[in-house]
């Protein structure tokens, strides 16, 4: 059989039907519009299609998988393309949920895109590499707490649903996986300059072992009004509210 060289697409197909069903059933139905990222051979898709109430679309980058999906699910609206380049605003009229056993090589980028479009995406159910799932679902004080934990938990309630063993994939990945669910909270504004907030969080975690006094230096902003107790802490010890305070107390333009 001819083996075609393929760009690395993070393809690990789930082979356990009960897990596929469990993932599909984890959507709470906040919105009828649902986008699946990376359906592959449709293992999750087939549990989503029968949910008649759903207005369902999928985006898949791999031509072979797209052909397979067209053959097996003729009514499925599958877009051939890269989710990271997709213009999500024109997909549905209104908000939509995101679901998938995601390609692990781009999971952070998927989550940053969700963050950017947080006001159109009320819910995400996704399988990630276990480490990424833990990082997103954890709170301050943990070693894995990071940029995405802060940014996403500012706008989403995040639940770690369950762990998935590597032997239920073909081919098995090197790492364990986990399914998490994000549901948009009712925060509409962080009561601070949100662009600067993102910049502060990113800068703080870039040097996560330094205290904020030192970690924030690259921003060249006036820190004299930031409470001393926050300047003495490291990024991983700060809550969303602490980052909001810091953002509001920083002075000066960049
Ligand atoms: N959901 C399937 C496949 C998971 S593997 C299952 O559970 O079995 C990840 C899938 O994402 C693959 O089908 C891969 O081709 C697809 N993919 C990778 N990068 C993508 C991108 N940038 N946009 C959309 N799909 C992508």
Image (cartoon, rainbow, N blue to C red):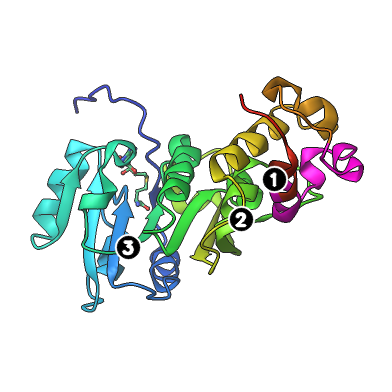
Residue at the image position 53 percent from the left and 59 percent from the top = 179
In this view, the residue in front, 67 or 17, is 67
Tag 3 or tag 1, which sits nearer the N-term? 3
Residue at the image position 19 percent from the left and 28 percent from the top = 1
- Report x, y in % for residue 229: 91, 44
Q: Which mark is residue 191?
A: 2
Residue at the image position 39 percent from the left and 74 percent from the top = 30
Q: Which residue is mark 3?
A: 96
Q: Nearer the viewer, mark 1 or mark 3?
A: 1
* Magenta stretch encompasses residue 232: yes
Specify few, some or many for label 3: CA neighbours under 10 Å numbering under 14, 14-19, or 20 or more: many
Residue 52 visible in the displayed image: yes
Whether tag 1 and tag 2 are in contact, CB under 8 A, the answer is yes
In this view, the residue in front, 30 or 59, is 30
Specify few, some or many for label 1: CA neighbours under 10 Å numbering under 14, 14-19, or 20 or more: some
Q: Quadrant of ligand 1?
A: top left
As helix, strand or loop, the secondary structure at mark 2 comes to: loop
Give the residues in magenta.
225-244
- The answer to whether residue 23 is above or below residue 10 is below
- Report x, y in % for residue 218: 70, 21
As helix, strand or loop, the secondary structure at mark 1 comes to: helix
* Total marks in image: 3
């Amino acid at each position: 059989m001819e083996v075609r060289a393929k760009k690395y697409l993070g393809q690990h197909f789930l082979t356990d039907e009960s897990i596929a069903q469990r993932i599909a059933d984890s959507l709470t139905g906040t919105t009828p519009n649902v986008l699946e990222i990376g359906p592959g051979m449709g293992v999750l898709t087939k549990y989503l299609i029968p949910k008649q109430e759903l207005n369902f679309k999928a985006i898949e980058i791999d031509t072979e998988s797209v052909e397979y999906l067209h053959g097996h699910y003729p009514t499925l609206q599958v877009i051939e393309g890269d989710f990271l380049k997709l213009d999500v605003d024109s997909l549905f009229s209104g908000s939509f949920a995101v679901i998938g056993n995601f390609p692990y090589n781009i999971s952070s980028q998927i989550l940053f895109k969700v963050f950017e479009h947080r006001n159109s995406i009320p819910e995400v159910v996704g399988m990630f590499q276990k480490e990424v799932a833990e990082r997103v679902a954890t709170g301050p004080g943990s070693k894995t707490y990071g940029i995405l934990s802060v940014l996403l938990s500012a706008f989403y309630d995040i639940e770690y649903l369950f762990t998935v063993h590597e032997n239920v994939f073909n081919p098995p990945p090197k790492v364990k996986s986990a399914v998490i669910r994000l549901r948009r909270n009712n925060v509409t504004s962080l009561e601070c300059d949100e662009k600067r907030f993102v910049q502060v969080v990113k800068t703080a975690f870039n040097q996560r072992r330094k205290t904020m006094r030192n970690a924030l230096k690259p921003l060249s902003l006036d820190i004299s009004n930031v409470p001393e107790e926050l300047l003495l802490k490291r990024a991983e010890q700060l809550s969303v509210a602490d980052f909001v305070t810091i953002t509001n107390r920083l002075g000066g333009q960049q």
